[in-house]
Structures are given as structure tokens and as C-alpha cells.
Image (cartoon, helix red, strand yellow):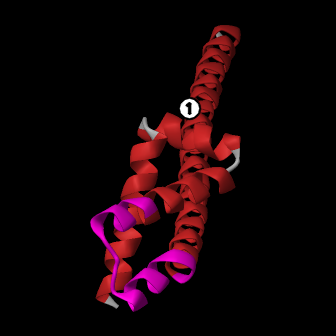
């Protein structure tokens, strides 16, 4: 009788320990997934901050080298606006590494649209300052 009781208690203890191990493994897996997502989000945030800085740099450079001269002369036309925008877009695109371009495409779908929106947003913000 004592041997049966010991075997039953040993079996229960093994099941309890196995359950704890399974629970611990699931919790560890969830923690790893959250850390992966946090790392991915942090990396994307850093990439967007980098692109914002490049956009700012390129818009300001275009303003200094092209837009301000045209405005000072009083002949800044819609064609000049389009030329300045395209010049800025080309500069931003050329400054971005291919790896960063791929990340933006994978995350947002279209690099050109993302960059155009970023440039337009910065121009709008700089006019409000």
C-alpha cells in the first residue's frame, strides 16, 4: 500500500513539475515575442527618425541653394516648386542606403509615397514655424 501511495505521489509530482515547465516555456516564449516586437518597433522608429533627419537636411539644402534665390528674385513659379520638390526627393533617395529603402518598402509598401509624404510634412511644418 505504501509503495502504491509513493508511486501515485511521484506521478502527481511529475505531472505538476511538467505543467510548471510547460507554463514556464510558454511564458518565456511570450516574453521573447514581446522583446522581438519591441526591438522591431524600436528599429523602425530609429529608421524613421533617420529618414526625417535626411528629409530635413535635403529640404533645407534645396531651400538654400534653389528656392530662396528664386523667391528673392520674385520669380518662384509652380514649375520651380515642382523642380525643388523633385530635387529634394532625388537627394533623399540618393542618401538612403538600399537596406533602409527595403525596410520602408516592407513596412509601408511604397518608398516614393513615404518619402513624398515625409517631405511635404516637413515643408508644411517649417512654414508654420
Percent position of residue 67, x then y: 45, 78
Query: Callout 1: 10 Å neighbours few (<14), some, many (20+)?
Result: few
Q: In the picture provided, is 127 more to the left or to the right than 33?
A: left
Residue 67 forms part of the magenta stretch = yes
Q: Which part of the image, by quadrant, shows the C terminus?
A: bottom left
Percent position of residue 54, x then y: 60, 66
Percent position of residue 25, x then y: 62, 31
Picture layout, residue 49 above or below residue 115 = below
Q: Residue at x 37, y 60 (%)?
A: 82
Quarter location, residue 81: bottom left
Question: Is residue 107 or residue 21 the one in the foreground?
Answer: 107
Picture layout, residue 17 above or below residue 69 = above
Q: Residue at x 51, y 37 (%)?
A: 105
Q: In the picture provided, is 73 more to the left or to the right than 46?
A: left
Quarter location, residue 46: bottom right
Q: Residue at x 46, y 56 (%)?
A: 86
Q: Which part of the image, by quadrant, shows the N terminus?
A: top right
Q: Which residue is mark 1?
A: 26
Residue stretch in magenta? 64-83
Percent position of residue 62, x then y: 53, 73
Quarter location, residue 103: top right
Q: In the picture provided, is 53 more to the left or to the right than 114?
A: right
Q: Name the dominant secondary structure of the magenta segment.
A: helix
Amino acid at each position: 500500500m505504501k509503495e502504491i501511495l509513493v508511486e501515485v505521489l511521484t506521478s502527481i509530482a511529475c505531472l505538476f513539475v511538467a505543467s510548471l515547465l510547460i507554463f514556464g516555456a510558454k511564458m518565456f516564449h511570450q516574453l521573447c515575442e514581446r522583446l522581438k516586437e519591441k526591438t522591431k518597433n524600436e528599429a523602425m522608429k530609429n529608421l524613421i527618425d533617420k529618414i526625417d533627419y535626411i528629409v530635413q537636411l535635403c529640404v533645407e539644402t534645396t531651400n538654400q541653394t534653389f528656392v530662396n534665390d528664386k523667391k528673392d528674385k520674385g520669380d518662384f513659379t509652380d514649375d520651380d516648386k515642382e523642380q525643388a520638390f523633385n530635387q529634394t526627393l532625388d537627394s533623399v533617395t540618393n542618401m538612403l542606403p538600399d537596406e533602409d529603402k527595403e525596410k520602408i518598402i516592407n513596412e509601408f509598401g511604397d518608398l516614393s509615397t513615404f518619402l513624398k509624404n515625409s517631405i511635404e510634412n516637413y515643408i508644411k511644418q517649417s512654414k508654420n514655424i
